[in-house]
Image (tube, rainbow, N blue to C red):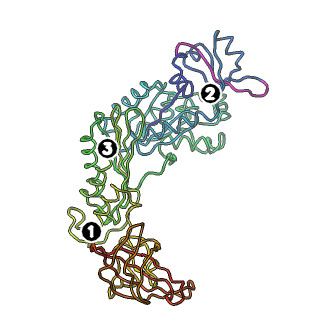
Amino acid sequence: MVVIEFSHLVTDWMLRRQPALKEKPFALAVNERGRRVVKAVNALAYAEGAFPEMAVADCRALVPGLQVFEYDPAQGQKLLSALAEWFIRYAPHVSVYLPDCLVLDASGCTHLWGSEPDYLEHIKEKLDSLGYTNKLAMADTIGTAWAVCRYGDQTVVASGEEAEALSGLPPAALRLEQPIVEKLAKLGLKTIGSFMYMDRVALRRRFGTPLLQRLDQALGAAPEVSEPIREIAAYEERLPSLEPIRTAVGIEMALKDLLGMLCLRLQQESKGLRKCRLKCYRMDGGIEQIEIGTNKPSRNTLHLFKLFELKIPQIEPDLGIELFTLEATVVEELQNTQDALWTVSGRSEAVIAELLDRLGEKNGVQNIHRYLPDEHYWPERSFKAASSLTEKPSSEWRTDLPRPLHLLPAPQPIQVSVPLPDYPPLLFIYRNVTHRIRKSDGPERIEQEWWIQEGVYRDYYCLEDEQGARYWVFRSGDYNTGNAQWFIHGFFA
């Protein structure tokens, strides 16, 4: 566990935005019970004797020329949360420990930077370059790391040496309540080592359970759980880069490595991904991300890479990318018949799904539709949108009678010339263009479902004009009533 303390978090943040204050002592204060109370000071004011919780008047007496600004109580937590999000590039599990600390679970991460000291040194250099005053410590437990960070001078506490590292520190290093600390001081117990090995029954009787609990947590005898700022993804792979990545080729190489690791894990669990997100953490603190989706669960690395490849140009590396993470946000079971997707696309259904994936990434998934037959007579009601690529139709498409390749969303009125009742027109005018009919077929009468809507029937005709184009038109209603109207409803190939 790594604990990072930010001694002057809010004032350092102000200095990043107002560099003119760098050589001036200043403080942030609020009104409390009729007086101005300091809540934060910068490093210069602190060195001259100004501390938080002092009255502004007392601070100005100690620090001539002290500038005082308004303090925002919520600013510290906002900054810690933002920094915690930024620190995900160093550890997947990052927690906020108010008022001024972050806790990182660095298990399995330090070797990526060489060693534990190198890992901490890299973090410290990065924070120093950003202008944040900081102190770090690493230990097997949060309690020991926090104690050493606040009160000790060690950077890394080796496993099993927690008791030795704690023994010379004051009782406050155990994160005890102030009344317990004061009671220990009155009894002359000024270091943790002075009571660490005392009889536990006596300690509980005199100081209560919290003292023993904090001691056990620091020594690793009792568990301590920290809540991460975000839930750790079940299917996520991380790839830090030793040198900042600035080129598309470098991004592609990192993506291929991540896809290989992720798909291998999915293969071992007989799963495939439906949605996947690539996050790129830049040197300047920015985060670039792109996402893809598939119609069917897939772990075909080549296919998934091609989907990402279409969006790589959207990534702006800026000063360089120092960490890549690949997360499968939606994962589903993959049938055994689809195992060929691991290396090749060997099945027609899989080929269609992958083609649709690529078309969706290029043109937008919202522009691709699949339709199934619906049990209605009127053509505009005879189909429905499919919910997925694998949805099965409840009935078959009608193939015994001609149907146009392109059906209009709604029939469009046309002007016709009809020589005899119940005959197709000799010509029709659609969008100010006259079409003279050379061949025709029909009629096909299609009734309306009386339980849906009452109305007249339709008589459909297939017409071919002099140019060879073929159309699907109909007459609505009985010709003899004098109220019949003609419409065009589709186009044949």
Q: CA distance from mark 2 to mark 1?
A: 76 Å
Pointers 3 and 1 in contact (C-beta within 8 Å): no
Position of the C terminus, as image quadrant, is bottom left
175 in magenta: no
| Mark drawn on residue 130 | none
The disc labelled 1 sits on which kind of residue? Ala
- The residue labelled by disc 3 is 313
Q: Earlier in the sequence, mark 3 or mark 1?
A: 3
Which residue is found at the position 66% from the left and 40% from the top?
206
- The residue labelled by disc 1 is 350
Residue 191, how many percent across, how many down?
55, 29
Secondary structure category for the residue under label 2: loop
28 in magenta: yes
Vertical placement of residue 461 versus 315, above or below: below
Q: Is residue 224 visible?
A: no
Is residue 419 or residue 445 the one in the foreground?
A: 419
The disc labelled 2 sits on which kind of residue? Gly
- The residue labelled by disc 2 is 188
Which residue is found at the position 51% from the left and 83% from the top?
484
- Residue mark closest to the camera, 3 vs 1: 3
Vertical placement of residue 236 versus 247, above or below: below
Residue 170 figure quarter: top right
Relative side of 271 to 218, left or right: left
Report the magenta residues as a range: 22-34
Outermost front residue: 419
Which residue is found at the position 26% from the left and 58% from the top?
303
Q: CA distance from mark 3 to mark 1?
A: 27 Å
Relative side of 81 to 254, left or right: right
